[in-house]
Image (cartoon, rainbow, N blue to C red):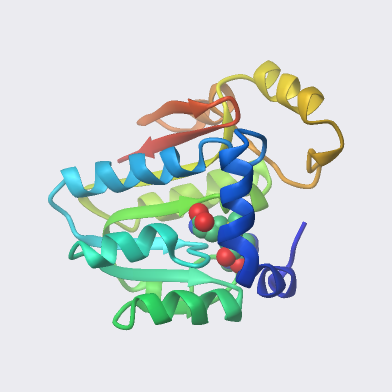
């Protein structure tokens, strides 16, 4: 699993390597553009414009929301990713911090209409995901939504099929979402599958 230095090194080539995997329709980024597009559409279809992005990376999704009038907050542990994203969104409030230790203080002090995390929360183990998502639910304004786009599967057997198909490129150190398992911890959660290995979760209070 990459640490903050690994993501610093990946930052410059990130958009290109993700695009190649998505275009080839292969794990891990098959469906990447559809996932980000789906979340973008759902946020702009709502009325709330205060958005928190966790692990925003180069800001591919949030820069589009920013251009469309959203106020952006974010947390990422890679200094290089923050530099790239901040250049695209000069007025965004972006903070450096490891979300496995929670939200940085400045972000805990706010409430948000939408909280998004794309291709990031698989860095948390399943029990950590549940705890962190509960913290995030408590940061939503009334009517707010959490949108998670990631490598994800409806069932554990779908995940196992993808693991076999992907062979050596499968990353055993990442913990991907499985809808039939995560749904047991939340009252309000939906999953929309957008490729063989990706989809969008929506959660609300
Ligand atoms: C695969 S990139 C995804 C970037 C972007 N959200 C996207 O969809 O293209 C993962 C991002 O999450 C950040 N990240 C990974 N683990 C993190 C952690 N524990 N705390 C904060 N940021 C983290 C990385 O620095 C990187 O920018």
Classify residue 54 as left or right of residue 205.
right
Q: Quadrant of ligand 1?
A: bottom right
The answer to which quarter of the image holds residue 154 is top right
Q: Furthest residue to the left?
A: 47
Query: Relative to 129, does residue 1 appear above or below in the rendering?
Result: below
Q: Residue furthest top?
A: 157
Where's residue 198, x and y in %?
54, 33
In the image, 160: left or right of 151?
A: right
Judge whether residue 99 can be spotted in this image: no
Along the viewing direction, whichever of 93 and 34 lies nearer the viewer: 34
Residue 152 in picture, x, y percent from top left: 58, 33
The N terminus lies in quadrant:
bottom right
Judging depth in this view, the residue of 63 and 134 nearest the camera is 63
Q: Residue at position x 64%, y 66% from top?
A: 13
Asked if 79 appears above or below 177 in the picture, the reply is: below
Q: How many marks?
A: 0
Q: In which image quadrant can residue 171 be found?
A: top right
Q: Quadrant of the C terminus?
A: top left
Q: Please name the residue shown 37% across and 37% down the image.
A: 202
Please name the residue shown 31% across and 60% down the image: 64
Residue 26 appears at what percent x and percent y? 65, 34
Q: Is residue 82 left or right of residue 47?
A: right
Image: 98 above or below 140: below
Which image quadrant is residue 188 in?
top left
Q: Position of residue 95 (x, y in %)?
A: 47, 79
Q: Residue at x 35, y 70 (%)?
A: 73
Q: Is residue 33 visible in the rendered structure shown here?
A: yes
Of 189 and 168, the residue lying toward us: 168
């Amino acid at each position: 699993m990459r640490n903050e230095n690994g993501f610093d090194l990946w930052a410059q080539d990130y958009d290109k390597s993700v695009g190649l995997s998505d275009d080839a329709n292969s794990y891990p980024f098959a469906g990447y553009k559809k996932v980000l597009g789906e979340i973008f559409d759902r946020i702009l279809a709502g009325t709330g414009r205060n958005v928190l992005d966790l692990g925003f990376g180069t800001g591919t999704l949030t820069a589009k929301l920013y251009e469309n009038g959203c106020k952006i907050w974010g947390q990422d542990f890679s200094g290089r990713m923050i530099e790239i994203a901040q250049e695209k969104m000069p007025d965004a409030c972006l903070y450096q911090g490891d979300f496995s230790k929670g939200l940085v203080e400045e972000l805990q002090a706010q409430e948000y209409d939408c909280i998004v995390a794309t291709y990031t929360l698989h860095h948390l183990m399943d029990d950590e995901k549940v705890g962190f998502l509960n913290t995030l639910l408590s940061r939503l304004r009334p009517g707010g939504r959490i949108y998670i786009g990631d490598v994800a599967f409806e069932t554990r057997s779908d995940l196992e099929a993808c693991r076999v198909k992907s062979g050596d490129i499968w990353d055993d150190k990442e913990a991907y979402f499985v809808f039939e398992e995560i749904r047991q911890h939340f009252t309000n959660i939906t999953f929309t599958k957008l490729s063989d290995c990706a989809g969008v979760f929506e959660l609300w209070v």
